[in-house]
Structure formats: C-alpha cells, structure tokens
Amino acid sequence: EINFFFPVEHTLAAIKPDTLEEHRDEILEQIQNAGFSLSQIKEEKLSREMAEEFYKEHKGKPFFEQLVDYMCKGPCLMMILSKENAVQEWRSLMGPTDPTEAQKSSPDSLRGRFAKSVLENAVHGSSNQDHALEKIKFIFGDIDLNMMVHEEEDSEK
Ligand code: RTP
Ligand code: MG
C-alpha cells in the first residue's frame, strides 16, 4: 500500500543495546504493524566517540556519561523508518522518555512496554526532520533517500 499523494518522510530509529537482546522481534513486529517501511537496517556497536557524537546535544548534562556507557555496552539496531509524518509517528510509537509517564499515558507504546528507567528506555528516535537527516547521515552515510522510495514504488508496479 504505497501512498502516492503524501510525501514520505524518513526518521532514524534505534533499539538500544539491552532491549535489542531482550525484545528485538516484538519491537520489529510493532514497527511493521504501525505501517512503517523499514528502508535500511543494521546492527552497530557504537564506539564511545560515536555515542558521544550521537548524543552531542546532551553533552554536559548530569546523565551524559551514563547515557554514553549505556549506548555502547552492546550493539544497537539502527533503522531508517519511512512513512508519511515518520518523525512524529515514531516518537509517538516510542512514547515519553520516562517510562513512569509512558506506562500512564501510553502503556502500549514501546517505552510503556519495555523501558526500565528514564535512562534505560529501550528506543531512540530523531526529534525533528533536520535531526533525522543529520543522524541518518551519521549512521548510514550519504545514501539517497529519494532513490530508496522510488525503487520501492517501482517494485509495486
Ligand atoms: P532519545 O533521544 O534517545 O530518542 O530520547 P528522548 O528524545 O525521548 O529524550 P532526550 O531528552 O533526548 O534524552 C536522551 C536519552 O538520554 C537518557 N536520559 N536519561 N537519567 C535521566 O534523567 C535521563 N534523561 C534522559 C535516555 O536514554 C534518553 O532517551
Ligand atoms: Mg532525544
């Protein structure tokens, strides 16, 4: 069911290390059921330097060192998810940062189901479109996002 009338948007999504070991298949299933196209996927164990760069906007905050430790303790599953309004839709599928809040407001969200704490909160998602393009480039390099979508459309014909 390719939608020709609305622009496809792309976001960077990640399953964080502990959660990848424990809940990979359940999360991939929930992503498929929510109607995202999985445009790219790879497992990657971030180095400290990469994790620091990935979350550079939080440098200097009290949780920064713990966050970097958490993100590089094992492989993450890195994905480009594509869909109309993908950035916001993935944020809403993730649920709020803090699982206490997630369990109250959106118990079926990924964080409502799988987050253990505000730090160990299962998944990552870009917070806006610029952020998405920057993180996609950081993780997947210079790939042509428009090309990916056209290939998908062509294969439907
Ligand atoms: P993310 O960037 O991972 O998608 O999460 P987010 O936008 O919902 O939250 P953000 O404020 O960007 O925080 C990034 C990650 O840092 C960890 N964190 N720990 N201990 C704490 O108070 C705390 N606050 C944030 C979480 O892993 C959060 O996802
Ligand atoms: Mg964030």
Image (tube, rainbow, N blue to C red):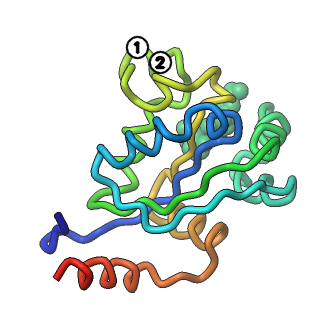
Q: Quadrant of the C terminus?
A: bottom left
Write down which quadrant ligand 1 falls in. Answer: top right
Q: Are marks 1 and 2 in contact (CB under 8 Å)?
A: yes
Relative placement, left or right, of 123 versus 6 is right
Q: Amino acid at mark 1?
A: Lys
- Secondary element under disc 1, as helix, strand or loop, is helix
At a point 12% along the width and 72% down the height, the residue shown is 5
> Alpha-carbon distance for marks 1 and 2?
5 Å
**For the residue with label 1, is its CB less than 8 Å from the closest atom of ligand 1?**
no
For disc 2, the marked residue is 101
Q: Quadrant of residue 118?
A: top right
Whole-percent x and y of residue 56?
A: 74, 54
For disc 1, the marked residue is 104
CA neighbours of label 2 inside 10 A, class few (<14), some (14 to 19), many (20+) = some
- Secondary element under disc 2, as helix, strand or loop, is helix
Whole-percent x and y of residue 77?
A: 61, 52
